Image (cartoon, rainbow, N blue to C red):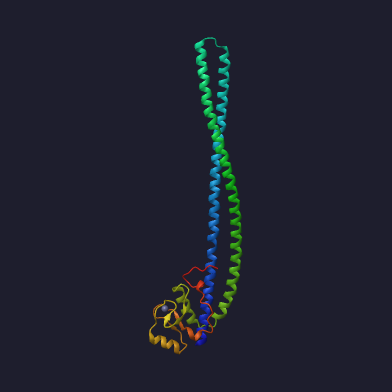
Amino acid sequence: MREEMINLIKLQEIDLKILAIDRAKEEFPESLKEAEEALAQKQKEYEALENEIEELQFKRRKFEEELEQEYQRLKKSQTRLMEVKAQREYQALLKEIEEIKKVNKQREEELLQMMERIETLHKEKEKLREEISALEKKVAEEREKYEARRAELDKQREAIWQERESIAVKIPANLLKRYEFVKSRRNGLAVVPVNDAICDGCHMNIPPQLYNELQRDDRVYECPICQRIIFFKKAYADILSGDENPESSPGKKGKS
Ligand SMILES: [Zn+2]
Protein backbone atom coordinates (compact mmCIF):
# COMPACT_ATOMS: atom_id res chain seq x y z
CA MET A 1 0.00 0.00 0.00
CA ARG A 2 2.83 2.33 0.81
CA GLU A 3 4.18 1.64 -2.66
CA GLU A 4 0.88 2.72 -4.18
CA MET A 5 0.93 5.96 -2.28
CA ILE A 6 4.52 6.61 -3.26
CA ASN A 7 3.65 6.15 -6.91
CA LEU A 8 0.66 8.47 -6.59
CA ILE A 9 2.80 11.14 -4.97
CA LYS A 10 5.40 10.80 -7.72
CA LEU A 11 2.73 10.91 -10.39
CA GLN A 12 1.31 14.07 -8.88
CA GLU A 13 4.73 15.73 -8.82
CA ILE A 14 5.25 14.82 -12.45
CA ASP A 15 1.82 16.05 -13.46
CA LEU A 16 2.46 19.38 -11.75
CA LYS A 17 5.65 19.70 -13.77
CA ILE A 18 3.73 18.91 -16.94
CA LEU A 19 1.11 21.48 -15.99
CA ALA A 20 3.81 24.08 -15.43
CA ILE A 21 5.33 23.26 -18.83
CA ASP A 22 1.95 23.55 -20.56
CA ARG A 23 1.34 26.88 -18.89
CA ALA A 24 4.78 28.12 -19.82
CA LYS A 25 4.05 27.15 -23.41
CA GLU A 26 0.87 29.23 -23.35
CA GLU A 27 2.58 32.22 -21.81
CA PHE A 28 5.03 32.95 -24.55
CA PRO A 29 2.76 34.19 -27.31
CA GLU A 30 1.66 37.03 -25.01
CA SER A 31 5.06 38.75 -25.05
CA LEU A 32 5.34 38.14 -28.76
CA LYS A 33 1.86 39.51 -29.28
CA GLU A 34 2.72 42.65 -27.33
CA ALA A 35 5.79 43.27 -29.47
CA GLU A 36 3.81 42.67 -32.66
CA GLU A 37 1.05 45.01 -31.55
CA ALA A 38 3.55 47.72 -30.68
CA LEU A 39 5.09 47.32 -34.13
CA ALA A 40 1.72 47.46 -35.90
CA GLN A 41 0.86 50.62 -33.98
CA LYS A 42 4.09 52.35 -35.01
CA GLN A 43 3.62 51.28 -38.62
CA LYS A 44 0.18 52.84 -38.58
CA GLU A 45 1.60 56.07 -37.16
CA TYR A 46 4.27 56.02 -39.85
CA GLU A 47 1.72 55.65 -42.61
CA ALA A 48 -0.38 58.51 -41.22
CA LEU A 49 2.72 60.68 -41.05
CA GLU A 50 3.61 59.89 -44.66
CA ASN A 51 0.13 60.88 -45.76
CA GLU A 52 0.33 64.13 -43.83
CA ILE A 53 3.68 64.98 -45.41
CA GLU A 54 2.36 64.21 -48.89
CA GLU A 55 -0.68 66.44 -48.39
CA LEU A 56 1.44 69.26 -47.05
CA GLN A 57 3.84 69.03 -49.96
CA PHE A 58 0.98 69.16 -52.42
CA LYS A 59 -0.32 72.25 -50.64
CA ARG A 60 3.11 73.80 -50.62
CA ARG A 61 3.57 73.37 -54.37
CA LYS A 62 0.20 74.97 -55.01
CA PHE A 63 1.10 77.81 -52.70
CA GLU A 64 4.41 78.36 -54.46
CA GLU A 65 2.67 78.50 -57.84
CA GLU A 66 0.22 81.08 -56.55
CA LEU A 67 3.02 83.11 -55.10
CA GLU A 68 4.87 82.96 -58.39
CA GLN A 69 1.79 84.32 -60.16
CA GLU A 70 1.59 87.13 -57.66
CA TYR A 71 5.23 87.99 -58.32
CA GLN A 72 4.42 88.21 -62.01
CA ARG A 73 1.43 90.44 -61.31
CA LEU A 74 3.63 92.65 -59.17
CA LYS A 75 6.20 92.90 -61.93
CA LYS A 76 3.53 93.92 -64.46
CA SER A 77 2.17 96.56 -62.15
CA GLN A 78 5.64 97.92 -61.52
CA THR A 79 6.28 98.11 -65.26
CA ARG A 80 3.01 99.88 -65.81
CA LEU A 81 3.91 102.34 -63.09
CA MET A 82 6.71 103.65 -65.31
CA GLU A 83 4.26 104.22 -68.13
CA VAL A 84 1.31 105.98 -66.50
CA LYS A 85 1.21 109.73 -66.66
CA ALA A 86 -1.97 110.63 -64.82
CA GLN A 87 -1.35 111.37 -61.20
CA ARG A 88 -4.56 109.68 -60.02
CA GLU A 89 -3.84 106.48 -61.93
CA TYR A 90 -0.28 106.54 -60.65
CA GLN A 91 -1.46 106.79 -57.07
CA ALA A 92 -3.97 103.96 -57.54
CA LEU A 93 -1.33 101.73 -59.05
CA LEU A 94 1.10 102.52 -56.28
CA LYS A 95 -1.51 101.53 -53.73
CA GLU A 96 -2.17 98.31 -55.59
CA ILE A 97 1.54 97.47 -55.62
CA GLU A 98 1.80 98.06 -51.88
CA GLU A 99 -1.21 95.83 -51.38
CA ILE A 100 0.29 92.99 -53.46
CA LYS A 101 3.57 93.29 -51.59
CA LYS A 102 1.81 93.13 -48.27
CA VAL A 103 -0.20 90.05 -49.21
CA ASN A 104 2.88 88.37 -50.70
CA LYS A 105 4.82 88.95 -47.51
CA GLN A 106 2.08 87.15 -45.62
CA ARG A 107 2.15 84.31 -48.12
CA GLU A 108 5.91 84.02 -47.85
CA GLU A 109 5.62 83.72 -44.10
CA GLU A 110 2.94 81.07 -44.41
CA LEU A 111 5.05 79.19 -46.91
CA LEU A 112 7.99 79.31 -44.55
CA GLN A 113 5.88 77.91 -41.74
CA MET A 114 4.67 75.17 -44.02
CA MET A 115 8.22 74.23 -44.94
CA GLU A 116 9.24 74.20 -41.31
CA ARG A 117 6.32 71.94 -40.51
CA ILE A 118 7.34 69.57 -43.32
CA GLU A 119 10.87 69.51 -41.98
CA THR A 120 9.61 68.69 -38.48
CA LEU A 121 7.45 65.92 -39.87
CA HIS A 122 10.38 64.49 -41.75
CA LYS A 123 12.36 64.36 -38.53
CA GLU A 124 9.46 62.63 -36.80
CA LYS A 125 9.29 60.19 -39.66
CA GLU A 126 12.97 59.42 -39.32
CA LYS A 127 12.56 58.84 -35.60
CA LEU A 128 9.59 56.55 -36.22
CA ARG A 129 11.55 54.62 -38.80
CA GLU A 130 14.23 53.95 -36.20
CA GLU A 131 11.63 52.88 -33.65
CA ILE A 132 10.05 50.57 -36.20
CA SER A 133 13.31 48.90 -37.09
CA ALA A 134 14.07 48.42 -33.38
CA LEU A 135 10.61 46.89 -32.91
CA GLU A 136 11.04 44.65 -35.94
CA LYS A 137 14.24 43.40 -34.40
CA LYS A 138 12.47 42.84 -31.12
CA VAL A 139 9.62 40.92 -32.75
CA ALA A 140 12.11 38.71 -34.58
CA GLU A 141 14.02 38.09 -31.37
CA GLU A 142 10.85 37.37 -29.41
CA ARG A 143 9.69 34.96 -32.06
CA GLU A 144 13.01 33.19 -32.13
CA LYS A 145 13.07 33.01 -28.34
CA TYR A 146 9.51 31.75 -28.30
CA GLU A 147 10.20 29.04 -30.83
CA ALA A 148 13.39 27.93 -29.11
CA ARG A 149 11.64 27.89 -25.77
CA ARG A 150 8.75 25.91 -27.19
CA ALA A 151 11.07 23.34 -28.66
CA GLU A 152 12.88 23.10 -25.34
CA LEU A 153 9.59 22.73 -23.44
CA ASP A 154 8.38 20.07 -25.88
CA LYS A 155 11.58 18.16 -25.29
CA GLN A 156 11.20 18.48 -21.53
CA ARG A 157 7.58 17.42 -21.72
CA GLU A 158 8.40 14.38 -23.76
CA ALA A 159 11.06 13.25 -21.29
CA ILE A 160 8.75 13.82 -18.33
CA TRP A 161 5.91 12.10 -20.11
CA GLN A 162 7.97 8.95 -20.47
CA GLU A 163 8.76 9.07 -16.79
CA ARG A 164 5.07 9.52 -16.10
CA GLU A 165 4.13 6.50 -18.17
CA SER A 166 6.62 4.33 -16.32
CA ILE A 167 5.01 5.26 -13.01
CA ALA A 168 1.39 5.24 -14.20
CA VAL A 169 1.61 1.58 -15.28
CA LYS A 170 2.47 0.63 -11.71
CA ILE A 171 -0.71 2.16 -10.31
CA PRO A 172 -3.85 -0.01 -10.23
CA ALA A 173 -6.31 1.07 -12.92
CA ASN A 174 -9.17 1.99 -10.58
CA LEU A 175 -6.88 4.13 -8.41
CA LEU A 176 -5.41 5.82 -11.46
CA LYS A 177 -8.91 6.55 -12.67
CA ARG A 178 -9.82 8.08 -9.34
CA TYR A 179 -6.64 10.14 -9.39
CA GLU A 180 -7.41 11.44 -12.89
CA PHE A 181 -10.98 12.24 -11.92
CA VAL A 182 -9.99 14.27 -8.85
CA LYS A 183 -7.21 15.95 -10.79
CA SER A 184 -9.63 17.10 -13.47
CA ARG A 185 -11.99 18.50 -10.83
CA ARG A 186 -9.35 20.05 -8.61
CA ASN A 187 -7.28 22.18 -10.91
CA GLY A 188 -4.58 19.57 -11.47
CA LEU A 189 -3.98 18.80 -7.81
CA ALA A 190 -5.28 15.38 -6.71
CA VAL A 191 -2.73 14.14 -4.15
CA VAL A 192 -1.84 16.34 -1.20
CA PRO A 193 0.02 15.97 2.08
CA VAL A 194 -1.59 16.47 5.44
CA ASN A 195 0.44 18.26 8.03
CA ASP A 196 -0.77 19.06 11.56
CA ALA A 197 -4.20 17.72 10.60
CA ILE A 198 -4.54 20.28 7.82
CA CYS A 199 -5.20 19.23 4.24
CA ASP A 200 -2.70 20.95 1.96
CA GLY A 201 -5.25 21.04 -0.85
CA CYS A 202 -8.14 22.91 0.77
CA HIS A 203 -6.33 24.07 3.94
CA MET A 204 -9.11 22.77 6.14
CA ASN A 205 -8.78 20.63 9.24
CA ILE A 206 -9.46 16.96 8.71
CA PRO A 207 -11.42 15.10 11.41
CA PRO A 208 -9.26 13.77 14.31
CA GLN A 209 -10.23 10.17 13.72
CA LEU A 210 -9.28 10.29 10.07
CA TYR A 211 -6.05 12.01 11.01
CA ASN A 212 -5.25 9.20 13.43
CA GLU A 213 -5.92 6.56 10.81
CA LEU A 214 -3.89 8.41 8.27
CA GLN A 215 -0.89 8.35 10.57
CA ARG A 216 -1.36 4.71 11.44
CA ASP A 217 -1.61 2.97 8.10
CA ASP A 218 -0.78 3.41 4.44
CA ARG A 219 -4.24 3.08 2.96
CA VAL A 220 -5.43 5.56 0.39
CA TYR A 221 -7.59 8.12 2.16
CA GLU A 222 -9.33 11.16 0.84
CA CYS A 223 -10.00 14.56 2.33
CA PRO A 224 -13.70 14.70 3.27
CA ILE A 225 -13.85 18.32 2.21
CA CYS A 226 -12.04 18.53 -1.12
CA GLN A 227 -11.98 14.79 -1.96
CA ARG A 228 -8.30 14.89 -2.77
CA ILE A 229 -6.20 11.84 -2.01
CA ILE A 230 -4.29 12.58 1.18
CA PHE A 231 -1.22 11.20 2.90
CA PHE A 232 0.55 11.88 6.17
CA LYS A 233 3.38 14.19 5.24
CA LYS A 234 5.91 13.03 7.82
CA ALA A 235 5.54 9.42 6.78
CA TYR A 236 6.60 10.20 3.23
CA ALA A 237 9.13 12.94 3.90
CA ASP A 238 11.87 10.80 2.36
CA ILE A 239 10.29 10.67 -1.09
CA LEU A 240 8.94 14.21 -1.27
CA SER A 241 11.05 16.48 -3.36
CA GLY A 242 12.75 18.99 -1.10
CA ASP A 243 11.05 22.17 -2.19
CA GLU A 244 7.34 22.68 -1.96
CA ASN A 245 7.40 23.72 -5.58
CA PRO A 246 5.38 26.89 -5.00
CA GLU A 247 5.87 27.99 -8.58
CA SER A 248 4.19 25.00 -10.07
CA SER A 249 1.34 24.89 -7.63
CA PRO A 250 -1.95 25.12 -9.49
CA GLY A 251 -3.87 28.32 -9.44
CA LYS A 252 -0.72 30.37 -9.77
CA LYS A 253 0.78 31.15 -13.09
CA GLY A 254 4.30 29.89 -12.80
CA LYS A 255 6.95 31.81 -14.68
CA SER A 256 9.93 29.90 -15.81
ZN1 LIG B 1 -8.90 18.89 1.44
Residue occupying the far bottom of the picture: 216
Residue 222 versus residue 30 in the image, above or below:
below
Residue for point 51% across, 81% down? 9
Please give left or right for residue 75 compared with residue 178 in the image: right
**Residue 144 at x, y percent in the picture:** 61, 60
**Residue 79 at x, y percent in the picture:** 58, 16
In what quadrant of the picture does the C terminus appear?
bottom right
Res 154 → quadrant:
bottom right
Please give left or right for residue 181 compared with residue 123 in the image: left
Residue for point 61% across, 64% down? 148
Front-lying residue, 120 or 130 = 120
**Residue 156 at x, y percent in the picture:** 59, 71
Residue for point 53% across, 64% down? 27
**Residue 145 at x, y percent in the picture:** 60, 62
Residue for point 53% across, 23% down? 101
- Quarter of the rendered image showing ligand 1: bottom left
Residue 127 versus residue 6 in the image, above or below:
above
Residue 65 versus residue 186 in the image, above or below:
above
How many labels sit on residues?
0
Front-lying residue, 36 or 170 = 36
